[in-house]
Structures are given as C-alpha cells and as structure tokens.
Amino acid sequence: MLSRSCYAARLGAFAASLGSDDVPLTGVTSATQERLSVYRNNVRLNRIAALTDAFVNVVQLVGEDYFHALARAYVDRTPAASANLHEDGAELAAFIRNFEPAAEMPYLGDVADVDWRLHRAYFADDADAVDGARLAELGPERFAAASLRLMPSVALARSNLWPIADILRMHDGGPPARLDAGGQSILIWREAFSVHWQALGMAEAQAVAALMAGASIEAALADTGADANSLLAQLFGRRLVHAIEVPHHETHI
C-alpha cells in the first residue's frame, strides 16, 4: 500500500503530466502514455472554455478566435493552480501585458483585470451587511476612527492609462470608448446573483483603496479629498459594508 506522501506525489506527477506534453509520467505503459494526450487536450479545452466565459470584455475586444489562441498560449505556459475552473485566470492580465502578439493593444491587460474582478465577484462568498440603523451606536468620533470591512464581492479595478469604465459602457451598448480619455477606476460588487459596477472618480477610488487596505474612515477621506457623504452613502446604501471595526477592540459591529 502506498503511503500518503507517495500517493500525493503520484497525484502531483499525474496532474503535472496532464498540464504539459513535456512532463512524462513514469510508471505507466507506453500505450497509457499515448492515451494521456487525449486527457491533456481535454484539460486544455476545458480551461480555454472557462477563460472564454470569464473574460467576456476581452473576448468582445479581440474576437473568439484570437482569444482562443491567446488562452491556449496562457494555458500551455501557466499551470492550473486549482481544480476549480472558476479560479483559473488569476494571472491572465499579467500574461497579456507580456504577450508580444497583444502589444498593439496595450489596454487589453487592464481590461482583463476588470474581467477577472467581475468574475471573482460573482463567485465570492456571501456575507451579511452591517445594519445601517446600528451606526447610531457609534458617535461621530468613534465612527471616524473606525475602519470598514467590505463585503467579499467588493473589488476595485483601477487603470492609470485606459478608460476601463468607458470600455464597459461600450460593451453594454454605449458609445465607442475613446482610448485617449485617460485612466479610470470602477467599483465592483454583487447583489443577489448579479454583478454590478460603477465608475469612481480619482479621489473616490483612492479612498476606497485606502479603506480596503485597513485605513480609518477619517484617514481615508482626509488623505484623498473624497466627498465623505457621497462615498459613505454609496457604500452603506448599497450594503457593501460587512463590518465596522473600532480601534482597541472597543466594539465590533
């Protein structure tokens, strides 16, 4: 009987051999080696199909044939980190930024980053939002010193150079995006079974990034100059706040 460590090593070797033609599987017959090519091809096709479903806006920009070729290159060079296909694609944005055939579309990596965050928002864990009525339990000073923990589905996508919000609007039937419009940011979240997004101004995006990094409400808003009333109304009004954490563990809402 194989030990657990030996069994795990065998499984790891088998998984590696499915992911690459260059990794032979030892301890099997030559006939089995030949049949593995069928499984390798199925693995590639399944991963490419999953990536096509996840990166909708990239597919719209480049077309399915181009995307399938790009995804094939990604799959061949990037081993799957999980057996869950919904988790495949975390490195695609970075891959695209270094993919020479896509060099003429320098915005494509940032669009892929948006697609990935939209995709992950859909599959994020559920959580309860803070009851807005309970905010009255905190006075203004304690609220300002508190930090916010946002819902698991909340994500922030930012591009320094490219109009990612305009590109999404274009794909929703809006006017063509002007690539010279400059960088944009969007806030992403899920409501029930639908993923939503909203464009954010620079100050709002910086404030959200600071909040997500654990900054206090006061610091995040003061350092960025964001409109406190508008931003907090959006976060609490859309039930995007999972918890409020007050310094020194005074309370936890």
Image (cartoon, grey):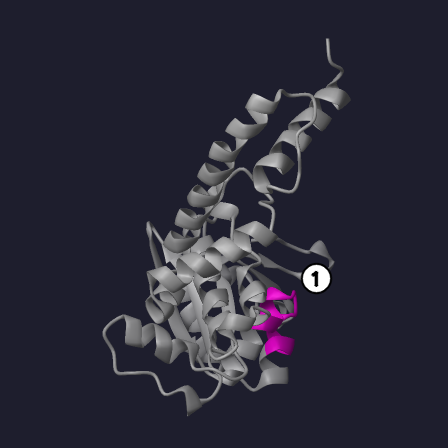
In this view, the residue in front, 58 or 205, is: 58
- Position of residue 183 relative to residue 67, above or below, is below
Categorize mark 1 by other alpha carbons within 10 Å: few (<14), some (14-19), many (20+).
Answer: few
- Position of residue 205 relative to residue 48, above or below, is below
Residue 43 percent location from the top left of the image: 48, 39
Q: Residue type at mark 1: give it.
A: Pro
Q: Provide the residue span drawn in magenta.
A: 209-220
| Observer able to see residue 239 | no
Q: Residue at x 50, y 66 (%)?
A: 113
**Is residue 213 covered in magenta?**
yes
Query: From the viewer's perspective, is 213 left or right of 32?
Result: right
Query: From the viewer's perspective, is 252 left or right of 61?
Result: right
Residue picked out by circle 1: 247
Quadrant hosting residue 18: top right
Residue 178 percent location from the top left of the image: 36, 88
Query: From the viewer's perspective, is 9 left or right of 110?
Result: right
| Observer able to see residue 117 | yes
- SS type, badge 1: helix
State which quarter of the image contains the N terminus: top right
Residue 19 percent location from the top left of the image: 58, 41
Quadrant hosting residue 33: top right
Q: Residue at x 53, y 51 (%)?
A: 75
**Farthest residue in the front direction?**
30
- Position of residue 7 relative to residue 104, above or below, is above
In this view, the residue in front, 213 or 220, is: 213
